Amino acid sequence: MFKEARYKMSEERLQQLKEELVYLQTVREKEVAQQIKEARSFGDLTENSEYDEAKTEQGKLYSKIAEIKNLIENAEIVKASDKTDSVGIGSKVTVRDMELESNDTYEIVGSQEADPTVGRISDDSPFGRGLMDKRKGDVIEIDAPAGILRLEILKIE
């Protein structure tokens, strides 16, 4: 039996998606419909680039709406872990790269909230999976595209 994918996210992220869906289905859908109406008024649709562009925009809009509906329908709400003895979703983890001898702090989040550029790492990523359930003082090895990372967990908040 095919199992529907679940998308881990916070209650806040789910609310953001619901708000975006309402905007797309109300404001944005009316804007695109108006663009199509205006383009139709220009006459012959076979050589009407404005009409083609408006229809393309409509297709993108409907695709985005479907994507957001799927995320909402298959959302799995995760609560930040209160425990600080091991890494879980919501944990802020400070690690020391044993090769570079530098420290970095990461927040472990659900896949829908990941943004590595600001240190928000998905629990589903290889890096996130490598940190999950580990404890302060643990030394772990993570197979990353740049090679094997050897990290020591310094702090869990």
Image (cartoon, rainbow, N blue to C red):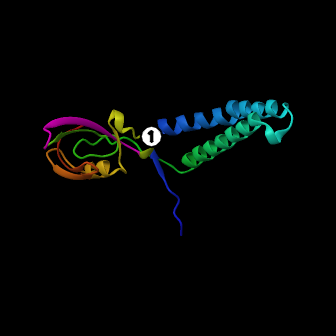
- Image-based side of 78 in relation to 88, left or right: right
Q: What is the residue that sits farthest to the front in this orientation?
A: 47
Query: In the visual, does 35 lie left or right of 127?
Result: right
Q: Residues within 10 Å of mark 1 (few under 14, many from 20)?
A: many
Residue 81 percent location from the top left of the image: 33, 42
Q: Main secondary structure of the magenta part?
A: strand
Which residue is most to the bottom? 1
Query: In terms of depth relative to the viewer, which is nearer, 11 or 148?
Result: 148
Residue 80: which quarter of the image?
A: top left
Identify the residue at horizontal 55%, vertical 38% (top origin): 17
Residue extent of the magenta highlight: 99-110
Residue in the image at 43% along x and 40% along y: 113
Q: Quadrant of the C terminus?
A: top left
Q: Residue at x 35, y 38 (%)?
A: 116
Residue 3: percent from left, percent from top: 51, 63
Q: 69 or 47: which is nearer to us?
A: 47
Label 1 SS:
loop
Quadrant of residue 156 within the rendered picture: top left
Horizontal side of 25 relative to 80 (left or right) equals right
Q: Is residue 22 shown in magenta?
A: no
Q: In the image, residue 105 lies at what x, y percent?
A: 25, 35
Badge 1 amino acid: Ser
Counting from the top left corner in percent of width and height, residue 67 is at 58, 46
Figure quadrant of residue 61: top right
What residue sits 67% from the left and 38% below the top?
A: 57
On the image, numbered disc 1 is attached to which residue? 10
